[in-house]
Image (tube, rainbow, N blue to C red):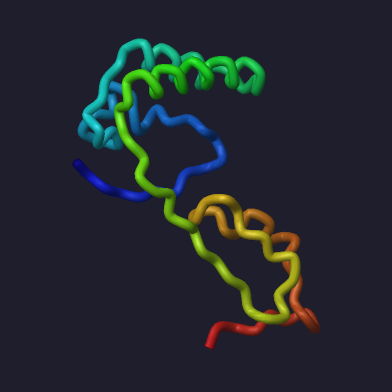
Amino acid sequence: MAEWASSYSYDPNDAANFSCDQIGKDNFNWYCNPKLDDLFAQEQATADPTVRQKVFDQIHQIMLTDYPVVFMFSPNDISISKKGTHNYEPGPFGATETVNVWQWWCDGGHCPSAS
């Protein structure tokens, strides 16, 4: 049994966590399924969202059958901004809290610094 938390990117590709060639690297589950590896290769070979969704559906079915991991919780990624900061919208993952930084603005053109 193990526990860890990660923040991911916008792309739902889980190959790093579940590919056979990632065992001992990012695949800390030591899970290997060659069928899943083939599906990861298919979803990474196209940018077409319709095609990728069909492949993700197949990946999901394998995950529901094999149960390589059991998710017990989903931690929140918390972010805040100082009063006077406008249009701050954190991304869905902790590492992307500045997804729209070019759209931020502050009262009087000056954002207060943290104190």
Q: Quadrant of residue 106?
A: bottom right
Residue 23 lies, in percent from the top left, at 24, 29
Q: Is residue 74 left or right of residue 85?
A: left
Q: Is residue 105 left or right of residue 52?
A: right
Q: Quadrant of residue 67?
A: top left
Quadrant in which the N terminus appears: top left
Residue 57 lies, in percent from the top left, at 53, 19
Q: Is residue 62 left or right of residue 42?
A: left
Name the foreground residue: 108 vs 59: 59
Q: Is residue 24 left or right of residue 45?
A: left
Residue at image point 33% right, 36% down: 70
In the figure, 115 relative to 98: above or below? Answer: below
Could you tell me how many numbered marks the image carries? 0
Residue 34 lies, in percent from the top left, at 32, 12
In the figure, 42 relative to 22: above or below? Answer: above
Residue at image point 78% right, 81% down: 107
In the figure, 97 relative to 41: above or below? Answer: below
Name the foreground residue: 20 vs 57: 57
Residue at image point 44% right, 19% down: 40
Q: Quadrant of residue 35?
A: top left
Residue at image point 34% right, 33% down: 17
Name the foreground residue: 96 vs 110: 96
